[in-house]
Each structure stands twice: as structure tokens, then as C-alpha cells.
Image (cartoon, rainbow, N blue to C red):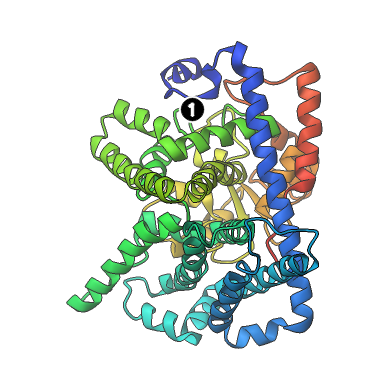
């Protein structure tokens, strides 16, 4: 199918089909939403990081490492208690006591963030993962029940996320406890846990992280089935996620189309260095997150009615929650809705760092449209070997390292762009795109067929692979405003989550 024909057949909602009359105001709206998201993330991160640094002066990391689960429980309780120290919805900044209360709140959030990150942390190597699982009683017990014992490493993620979100969700929902402090703590927690949870969720939709080992007893199977249900339905709702949505979109749309023009998350038509194109992509993802419209139309076109029903059921559960919350506590309903809608920006960040460089000669070639990141030998629990994952999505995540190593050692080298994650993180990669800093990306990258140290050639390839395919490039004033905005947002984007 030609690019033009593919666009004509694309699901409704693709930006390229939008009438030009609406393009400027639509882009302005999308840019405002994404700018708010980036600036809010920046503010929350630096407030939390500053508070965590101060807490670290009193409570060193080594002390938390002795009992990370205990400190996570304590820090969550302290943070939840700190949200209830003011009598009204907003603190009174003419009252010195309430100013102190807000300082205490941020210190408690800093303690929580440090405790969470230490508890959810995992080693860089496979051997380290096994030793870490063995060192924790809960992880060790879970590993003995699983078909893939190494999947027990995700225990710290779903347990940590549950401890964080259950009390904060209760405080958010109850009309008598919700206030500005609760919104601040809820926002930090939701932002902090999204990327770790996505690691676990991504593995789960492909190979099920609660799969029982062969010969497991009926009681073990029942337990793991209950944990599977909790993870996919209850915890998903606590994290502003709709059950089944991710699995349906990712497995039956994204992996089928492989970032092609019919993929609801495709980056190919975007100028990947444009903040405005990122914003339009993120806005569309946000609309899909709350309506599923592009996914629904794609699945209907392909005749995948079972997946349509799964998508509809998951969104019905999520919208049912929003409606009930709206009757009980409209503010809480609005916050949950906005949190999910703004999650489109999180999806687009991941899409742009994984599919930000696209070979125009074959946009659906996995090696040509995926970026790999090397750092952890297991590839950040398999997530960073993205080309290998797209080529064999049904394989267990622990196998991708061997596949990556085999291809990297082959004649000509690895055919995907490979970034050095230990010195250039995925978020730093996105920031470099927005700065149009092709040279820096090339400096930390390798590509099969390009000689080591030939940064000029690689820089040219990087620039070529950021160009929109079957899309339009901005010119004149629009391009200049876009470039300035992109540089500003690149400065504001937090490129790490260390507290």
C-alpha cells in the first residue's frame, strides 16, 4: 500500500487528515496541554528531588536499604498523614503554621520517593536479579510459584505501587479528606510509579507475570489467578488505567502495524524533532486513552470483534468508575479523568524514544524504526531491546539479551540504532530531539554499517530518520516558534528520576 493510500485508509483521528483550517488552533491547544504536562512534571520532580536531598541528610540511603519495604510503608503513612494537616482545601499562606505544614508535606513526599525508588530498584545484571530476588522473603516465595522464577523481580513493582496508591486513592475519593496536599502527593506518586509499572504491565500483556509453574497445586493456581486479576483490573484502575486497553492496543494494533501509518501510535508522519508534532501525537493518545476511538475503528476495519469487546469492556469499567466518582466526589472524578488523559504524553514519550528514528526506506522494518538502549545487560527487564522485542514479541523478556548480543556480534554490526543508556537516557534522547541536536544523539549511538567514530555520517542518518514520512514539515514563523518551544521544553524535561 502506498503512503497516500495508507493515510486515506487510516483510522479517523490521524492528524494528517485534519482540515488545514483547524490545524493551527488544534496545534496550539495540543501544545498548551503538553507544555502544561512537561512544566508540571518539572515542578513536581524538582520539589520532590529537593525534599529527598534534604531527607537524605538525616536519613542516609544505607539505612533505608536495610528494610526497604518497611520504610516504604512508613513513608507512605507519614505522607498520607501530612496531607491532612490543613483544615481547608488550600493552605492559608498568611498562616505560618500552614506554611510549615506544606514544608512538612514535601519532606514527607521526599521520604516516600526515596523509599519507593530504593524498594523498587533492581540490579543491572541477570545474576544480580536472581540474588536480589533471593534476598527478599516475599520475592523469593513468589519466585518459587512461577513458571519463570525471574518474573518475581516484578513483585517489588506491583507491591510498591499498591502500597503507594491505595491510601492516596482513598484520600482522593473521600470528600472529607481531599485537598490540595492530597492532589500534590497523588500527582507525585502517579508520576513516579508510571514507568516502573509500565515495565511490569508490558511483560504481563505478552507473557503473563503470574503464570504458575508446571505441576503447581490448585491452591497456588488460585492464588496466582487472583493476583493476575488484581494486577490487571484493580491496580490498573488505581493507576488511572483502563483494564484490557493496553493489551488490546499494544498487541493487536501496535505490534501488527509495527509503527506503520495505520498504527494508532505511529510516529512516522511526525517531525520527531518538533515539540508541536509531539504535542499533537500526545493529544491524540490522550483522546484514545479515554475513548479508544482510533483503536476501535482499526479493530472494526480488521474484523477483530473479540478485541473490540475487550476494549469496550475495559473502557466501560473505567467510565463506570468515573461516573460513580462524579456522583460522589466530582473533584476526584475530574482528577482521575485528567490524569488518564494527560497520560497520552507519557505514551508519546515512550513512543518517541523507542520509535523516534525511522528509516524512510521501510518504515515497518523493526531494525529501521526501533531504537535499542544498552546499559543493563538484561535491557531494563527486556524493555530496552526494542527491535528484538518487535521481531519476536512472544518471547520471554529474559531472552532478548542473547538475541541482541548475537546480532550485535554479527558481520556488519547491529542494524538498529543503539544508544548508550548509561550516559544518555531515553528522556535525554527525547530532549535532544526537541533541540534538533542530531550530533549529540550520534555521539552516543552506534549503527551497523557506520564505522566507529564516524559521527558525521551517523549525524546525517539521524537527521534523515527524524523527518516526517507522508507528513508535512513546518516552515517560516511556525517552524521558528516550534524550535524555540522545543528548546524550552527540552530544558524543562526531567531526564532522570533519582531522588
In depth, the one of 255 and 246 nearer the eye is 246
Query: Which residue is rendered at x = 37% and y = 54% of the image?
Result: 205
Residue assigned mark 1: 261
Q: Where is residue 219, by image quadrant?
A: bottom left
Q: Where is residue 214, by image quadrant?
A: bottom left
Query: Which residue is rendered at x = 53% and y = 30% of the image?
Result: 362
- Residue 149: image location, x then y, percent: 38, 75
Q: Where is residue 466, by image quadrant?
A: top right
In depth, the one of 408 and 171 nearer the eye is 171
In depth, the one of 489 and 431 nearer the eye is 489
- Residue 125: image location, x then y, percent: 57, 73
Query: Which residue is rendered at x = 72% and y = 69% of the image?
Result: 101
Q: Is residue 141 left or right of residue 340?
A: left
Q: Is residue 94 left or right of residue 416?
A: right
- Residue 261: image location, x then y, percent: 48, 27
In depth, the one of 465 and 492 nearer the eye is 492
- Residue 243: image location, x then y, percent: 36, 50
Amino acid at each position: 500500500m502506498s503512503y497516500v493510500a495508507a493515510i486515506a485508509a487510516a483510522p479517523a483521528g490521524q492528524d494528517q487528515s485534519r482540515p488545514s483550517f483547524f490545524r493551527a488552533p488544534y496545534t496550539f491547544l495540543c501544545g498548551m496541554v503538553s507544555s502544561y504536562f512537561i512544566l508540571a512534571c518539572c515542578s513536581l520532580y524538582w520539589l520532590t528531588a529537593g525534599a529527598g536531598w534534604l531527607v537524605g541528610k538525616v536519613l542516609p540511603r544505607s539505612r533505608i536499604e536495610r528494610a526497604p519495604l518497611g520504610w516504604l510503608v512508613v513513608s507512605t503513612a507519614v505522607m498520607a498523614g501530612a496531607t491532612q494537616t490543613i483544615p481547608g482545601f488550600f493552605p492559608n499562606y498568611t498562616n505560618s503554621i500552614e506554611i510549615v505544614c506544606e514544608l512538612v508535606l514535601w519532606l514527607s513526599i521526599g521520604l516516600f520517593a526515596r523509599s519507593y525508588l530504593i524498594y523498587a530498584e533492581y540490579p543491572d545484571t541477570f545474576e544480580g536479579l536472581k540474588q536480589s530476588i533471593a534476598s527478599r522473603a516475599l520475592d523469593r516465595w513468589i519466585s518459587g510459584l512461577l513458571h519463570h522464577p525471574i518474573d518475581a523481580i516484578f513483585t517489588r513493582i506491583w507491591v510498591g505501587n499498591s502500597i503507594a496508591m491505595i491510601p492516596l486513592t482513598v484520600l482522593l475519593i473521600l470528600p472529607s479528606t481531599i485537598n490540595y496536599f492530597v492532589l500534590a502527593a497523588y500527582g507525585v506518586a502517579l508520576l513516579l510509579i508510571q514507568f516502573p509499572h509500565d515495565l511490569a504491565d508490558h511483560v504481563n500483556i505478552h507473557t503473563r507475570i503470574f503464570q504458575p509453574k508446571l505441576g503447581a497445586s490448585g491452591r497456588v493456581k488460585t492464588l496466582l489467578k487472583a493476583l493476575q486479576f488484581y494486577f490487571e483490573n484493580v491496580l490498573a484502575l488505581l493507576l488511572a488505567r483502563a483494564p484490557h486497553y493496553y493489551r488490546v492496543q499494544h498487541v493487536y494494533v501496535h505490534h501488527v502495524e509495527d509503527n506503520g501509518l495505520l498504527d494508532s501510535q505511529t510516529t512516522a508522519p511526525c517531525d520527531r524533532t518538533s515539540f508541536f508534532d509531539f504535542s499533537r501525537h500526545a493529544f491524540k493518545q490522550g483522546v484514545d486513552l479515554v475513548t479508544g476511538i482510533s483503536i476501535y475503528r482499526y479493530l472494526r476495519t480488521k474484523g477483530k470483534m473479540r478485541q473490540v469487546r475487550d476494549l469496550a469492556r475495559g473502557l466501560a469499567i473505567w467510565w463506570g468508575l468515573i461516573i460513580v466518582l462524579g456522583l460522589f466526589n466530582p473533584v476526584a472524578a475530574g482528577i482521575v479523568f485528567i490524569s488518564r488523559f494527560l497520560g497520552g504524553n507519557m505514551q508519546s514519550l515512550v513512543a518517541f524514544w523507542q520509535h523516534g528514528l525511522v528509516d524512510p526506506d521501510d518504515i515497518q522494518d523493526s531494525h529501521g524504526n526501533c531504537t535499542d538502549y544498552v546499559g543493563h545487560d538484561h535491557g531494563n527487564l527486556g524493555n530496552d531491546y526494542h527491535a528484538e522485542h518487535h521481531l519476536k514479541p512472544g518471547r520471554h523478556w529474559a531472552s532478548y539479551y542473547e538475541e541482541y548480543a548475537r546480532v550485535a556480534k554479527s558481520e556488519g554490526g547491529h542494524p538498529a540504532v543503539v544508544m548508550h543508556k548509561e550516559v544518555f537516557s531515553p528522556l535525554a534522547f527525547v530532549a535532544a530531539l526537541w533541540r534538533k541536536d542530531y550530533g549529540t544523539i550520534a555521539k552516543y549511538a552506534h549503527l551497523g554499517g557506520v564505522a566507529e567514530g564516524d559521527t558525521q555520517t551517523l549525524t546525517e542518518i539521524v537527521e534523515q530518520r527524524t523527518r516526517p514520512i507522508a507528513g508535512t514539515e513546518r516552515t517560516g514563523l511556525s517552524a521558528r516558534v516550534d524550535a524555540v518551544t522545543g528548546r524550552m521544553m527540552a530544558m524543562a524535561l526531567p531526564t532522570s528520576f533519582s531522588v
